[in-house]
Image (spheres, helix red, strand yellow):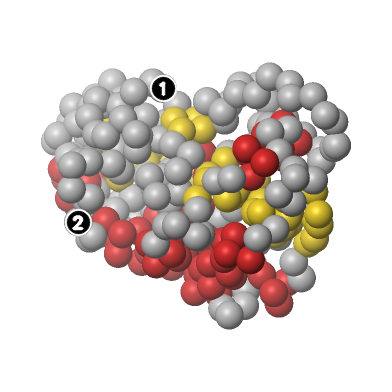
Amino acid sequence: MMKRKIVKFDENKCTGCGECVDACAEAAIEIVNGKARMAGEVYCDGLGACLGRCPEDAIAIEEREAEAFDERAVTWRLRRLSQPEPAGCPSAAIHDHGAGPASAGCPSAVSRDMATPNDAPSRLSAGPDLVEYRLRNWPIQLALVQPDAPFLRGADLVLAADCTAFARPTMLTELTAGRPLLIACPKLDDSEPYLSKLTDMFAEAHLRSLTIVHMTVPCCHGLSHIVRQAMGAAGADVPVTEVTIGIEGNIETTKNWPAQARTAET
């Protein structure tokens, strides 16, 4: 975080006309529930090109602690926004930022941060009992989540292969309690869209850490390979812990990736 100039919005004046969205070359502004919102501090250069386009004088420049402007993140965001939406699921990029369902969009893809002040990451344990578990975010399918979903920003993310929670149900409380969770199947799913999405995620979300959980079978290790390629493509260096689950539900290995392995593209 650094102290710099950044755009702010007056909700009482904003009518959601969208003029500021069109004026922002960095796509730093989006309309959520009829009001202009910052899509992410990293996208705003603080120059204020949007100020003169607001008919209600609802935009100003303030100087405060904010994430640094990131041109690379802007490039990834513009590239993603230029891609067509999947058929049958319009407006998947609309977020409700934890405030309930958005006004439009496919319900399966609308981001929701469901954290509470009492949520806290759990430590790895071998307890046999499955205690109550509650999702921290929605969606959890990697294929549905947007790379700039609010719950991903600066998060300690868990990326798990689909079968792991069935092979070891206690994994949900051991590894994911209080953390965002995404799931995918490196065996049955097409890996190319995953590679593109994870690359965007590493570039935009600025993850604090990543825990990969996969089964011991060889095909499931593909999840780790995709992550390595995505981190290399994004030029990211995120601390990674890789957990391998046996088919009988035991934790076979837990290892941390060295920095050079985290950014390897092979």
Tell me how far mark 1 sits from mark 2, CA to CA: 26 Å
Circle 2 Cα neighbour tier, 10 Å, few/some/many (<14 / 14–19 / ≥20): few
Mark 2 secondary-structure assignment: loop
Residue wearing tag 2? 84
- Compare residues 187 and 208 and report the one nearer the observer: 187
* Foreground pick, 261 / 127: 127
Residue at image location 66% in from the left, 54% down from the top:
215
148 displayed left or right of 57: right
- As drawn, the label of residue 189 is none
Q: Which mark is residue 99?
A: 1
Q: Which residue is nearer to you in this view: 171 or 136?
A: 171
Instruction: Give the label, 1 or 2, closer to the camera.
Output: 2
Residue 184 percent location from the top left of the image: 50, 50
Taking the spot 65% from the left edge, 24% from the top edge, the residue there is: 133
Percent of width and height locating residue 41 = 45, 48
- Total numbered circles: 2
Q: In the rendered image of this protein, does residue 109 appear above or below residue 101?
A: below
Q: Is residue 175 left or right of residue 73?
A: right
Q: Position of residue 140 (x, y in %)?
A: 48, 39
Mark 1 or mark 2: name the one nearer the start of the chain: 2
Secondary structure at numbered mark 1: loop
Residue 18 position by quadrant: top left
Check the image and name the residue furthest to the front: 248
Q: Position of residue 182 (x, y in %)?
A: 53, 44
Q: Residue at x 63, y 66 (%)?
A: 218
In the rendered view, does 53 fall on the left or right side of 115? left
Which amino acid type is shown beneath numbered disc 2? Pro
What is the crowding at mark 1: few (fewer than 14 residues within 10 Å), some, or many (at least 20)?
A: few
- Can residue 49 be seen from the camera position used here? no
